[in-house]
Image (cartoon, rainbow, N blue to C red):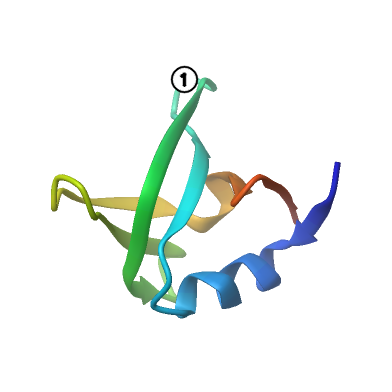
Amino acid sequence: MQAIHISTAQQMMLRPDPVDLVVFKSDGSLVSYPNVISLKYDFYKGTRTIKFLRSNEIRTVRDVCISKINGLEVFL
């Protein structure tokens, strides 16, 4: 399995291309977010606003909670 650094994942999120994310929830379980784009990033909070392309739903996730991006594991 391949892994990438969090900074590489952040660079991937800056592009306008959709990505597939796997994110840790507050209870420790994993949730999959397929086909999302990043709208904005707050450097001071470490949060990212993402948009689901299928439903147009908008959510906020912390970058440190991203486990996988496009099937690649993310490490700190």
Location of residue 9 (image quadrant): bottom right
Within 10 angstroms of label 1, few (less than 14), some, or many (20 or more) residues? few
Could you say where residue 28 lies in the image, as x and y percent from the top left? 54, 22
Q: How many marks?
A: 1
Q: Is residue 58 above or below residue 39?
A: above
* Residue under the image location 43 percent in, 71 percent down: 17
Instruction: Please identify the residue farthest to the right as the structure is shown.
Output: 1
Kindly identify which residue carries mark 1.
Answer: 27
Could you say where residue 37 lies in the image, as x and y percent from the top left? 35, 64
Could you say where residue 61 lies in the image, as x and y percent from the top left? 38, 50
Of the residues shown, which amino acid type is indicated by label 1?
A: Asp
Location of residue 33 (image quadrant): top left
Q: Is residue 41 above or below residue 22?
A: below
- For the C terminus, the quadrant is bottom right
* Residue under the image location 69 percent in, 71 percent down: 8
SS under mark 1: loop
* Residue under the image location 68 percent in, 72 percent down: 7
Q: Is residue 7 above or below residue 62?
A: below
**76 on left or right of 43:** right
**53 on left or right of 18:** left
- For the N terminus, the quadrant is top right
Could you say where residue 6 lies in the image, as x and y percent from the top left? 68, 63
